[in-house]
Image (cartoon, rainbow, N blue to C red):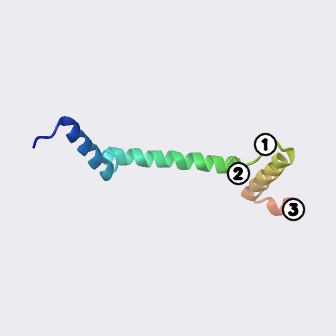
């Protein structure tokens, strides 16, 4: 029983997915995509945007600013001095 070109292409695509998105090039793409996602997540965490804040409430914004400032102080080792 002969298979059509479309069936062969579908089979090849399924095999490529199982092997890691088109072989070595696809694996590199997957690693690149994961690295980009991790970079964005890290950037969000460092800038304080990862926390969900209700921007309509000024006290929530102030709390966020205080937490962000505390994170900065801890990062520079000045947290203990600021508490005194």
Label 1 crowding class (10 Å Cα cut-off): few <14, some 14-19, many 20+? few
* Local secondary structure at mark 1: loop
Q: Nearer the viewer, mark 3 or mark 2?
A: 2
**Image-quadrant location for residue 80:** bottom right
Cα–Cα gap, marks 3 and 2:
23 Å
Q: Nearer the viewer, mark 3 or mark 1?
A: 1
Q: Are marks 3 and 1 in contact (CB under 8 Å)?
A: no
Label ID, residue 83: 3
For the view shown, which residue lies furthest in the front direction?
1
Side of 79 relative to 39 (left or right):
right
Label 3 crowding class (10 Å Cα cut-off): few <14, some 14-19, many 20+? few
Q: Nearer the viewer, residue 31 or 4?
A: 4
* Local secondary structure at mark 3: helix
Residue at image mark 1 = 55
* Residue 58 in the image, given as x and y percentages of width and height: 86, 44
Q: Nearer the viewer, residue 78 or 35?
A: 35
Residue at image mark 2 = 51
Label 2 crowding class (10 Å Cα cut-off): few <14, some 14-19, many 20+? few
Q: Residue at x 62, y 46 (%)?
A: 43
- Rendered-image quadrant of the C terminus: bottom right
Cα–Cα gap, marks 3 and 1:
27 Å
């Amino acid at each position: 029983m002969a298979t059509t070109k479309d069936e062969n292409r579908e089979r090849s695509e399924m095999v490529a997915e199982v092997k890691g998105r088109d072989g070595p090039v696809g694996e590199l793409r997957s690693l690149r995509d994961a690295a980009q996602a991790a970079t964005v997540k890290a950037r969000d965490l460092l800038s304080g945007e990862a926390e969900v804040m209700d921007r309509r409430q000024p006290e929530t914004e102030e709390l966020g600013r205080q937490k962000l400032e505390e994170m900065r102080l801890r990062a520079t080792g000045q947290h203990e001095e600021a508490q005194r």
